[in-house]
Image (cartoon, grey):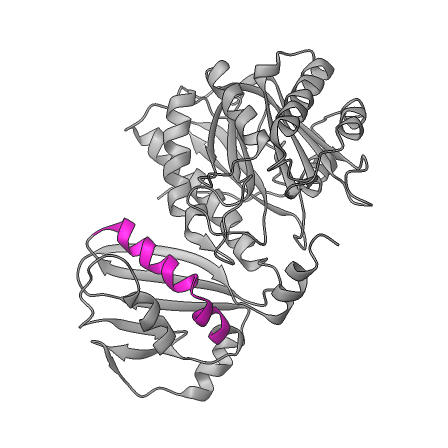
Amino acid sequence: MLNLQTVSPLTLTTPKGFKATGIHVGLKRKRKDLGLLVCEGGASAAAVYTTNQMQAAPIIVTKQAMEASEGRIHAILVNSGNANACTGELGLTHAYTSQHAIANHLQIKPEQVAIASTGIIGQTLAIDTLVTGVGQLVASEAEEEADAFAHAILTTDTGIKTAGYQFLMNGSEVSICGVAKGSGMIHPNMATMLGFLTTDATVEPNVLQTILKRSIDRTFNCITVDGDSSTNDMVMMLASGAAKTPTIMLDTQEAEQFEQAVTHVCQELAKLIARDGEGATKLIEVTVQGTDEERLARKIAKQIVGSSLVKTAIFGEDANWGRIVAAIGSIDEPIDVSKIDIRIGSQWVLRQSMPILFDETLASNELAADTVAIEVDLNSGSAVGRAFGCDLTYDYIKINASYRT
């Protein structure tokens, strides 16, 4: 069992070799809107991107940088307040301009820079404002500057989302930390939003890519808020190698340890995103067991937590297990529906696909908590999968009805 330690503070700059900052330049009215993460010696990089076909210009530019640099990235520039998505050739030009501006500022090659944007889709990026702001960026290892970066990437989030762990690998201390933003437009088939992870372990880009993708499949790919994926979703991880550990190779004990830690960080961030769903009052955790494949268990769990009827029932504190059954039955793969067990909170409400008596008052009280657990057993195998989401509230409509104003 991997012994993970949470040490305060754990920020993006806790792993050796990283600096960060975040400032307000005027892309948003008041809050910080431009962030920079730097690994001066260069880092192995891995990234997972949105599968939405309408991919924003920063995604295109970052993909090109990753290919040109063979997965060696020195800096990530992130702006909020404008997604630079669906902005045509001008948007692509602005993305390149952003990349070149920070490359010149740091005196590195443009292909060593990844960029990301988040905010309103379809509006022209105020590129002169952004470029002027780039010249004001001074990254450092200070905790407050790492927090400033975490604030600079936010949109409708109610607060920053951070997670991190430390553990020993062959006697050396390794740190893995991450930040994320996201509260709406979360229904990924990849990452979910914007997420950035740092580590001082020594990992080659191809190994890091494999580990990050597997971790994301079990975490960020298992959350849903509102059924929409965005044009700008990306998770990127940088490994500085500054902890001087032996190079991590796949199919080794070290790789297993490292992947466990990455998955823990990603899961913490994923749950924070689900809990912070726009207008949400509750985190919903769904566990599905008893399938032949983990993939199928995760898919069913996500189907349940993504159901608007389930989400509204949880908001109304109504233990309506029929909504859960309907969500399970709508899966587009064959399953045995004759022996399903369902538990809501502490009570079983369905056994072998037949209703059983339960305490409605207790169920309603448990559904009033800020975390609601739903467990499903299909009794057809040993695989387990989980998904995370939130309830659907009146405030979700208010927030999104007036998002641009």
Counting from the top left corner in percent of width and height, residue 261 is at 43, 39
Counting from the top left corner in percent of width and height, residue 71 is at 47, 19
Residue 74 relative to residue 343: left or right: right
Magenta-colored stretch includes residue 308 = yes
Magenta-colored stretch includes residue 334 = no
Quadrant containing the C terminus in the rendered view: bottom right
Q: Which of the pair 301/403 is nearer the observer?
A: 403
Quadrant containing the N terminus in the rendered view: top left
- In magenta, the rendered stretch is 293-313
**Quarter location, residue 16:** top right
Look at 53% across and 22% down and name the residue there: 240
Q: Which of the pair 117/215 is nearer the observer?
A: 117
Counting from the top left corner in percent of width and height, residue 44 is at 49, 21
Q: Which of the pair 142/318 is nearer the observer?
A: 318
Counting from the top left corner in percent of width and height, residue 41 is at 59, 15
Whether residue 323 is visible to the viewer of this picture, yes or no, is: yes
Residue 382 position (above or below residue 373): above
**Quarter location, residue 373:** bottom left
Look at 35% across and 61% down and name the residue there: 287
Q: Main secondary structure of the magenta part?
A: helix
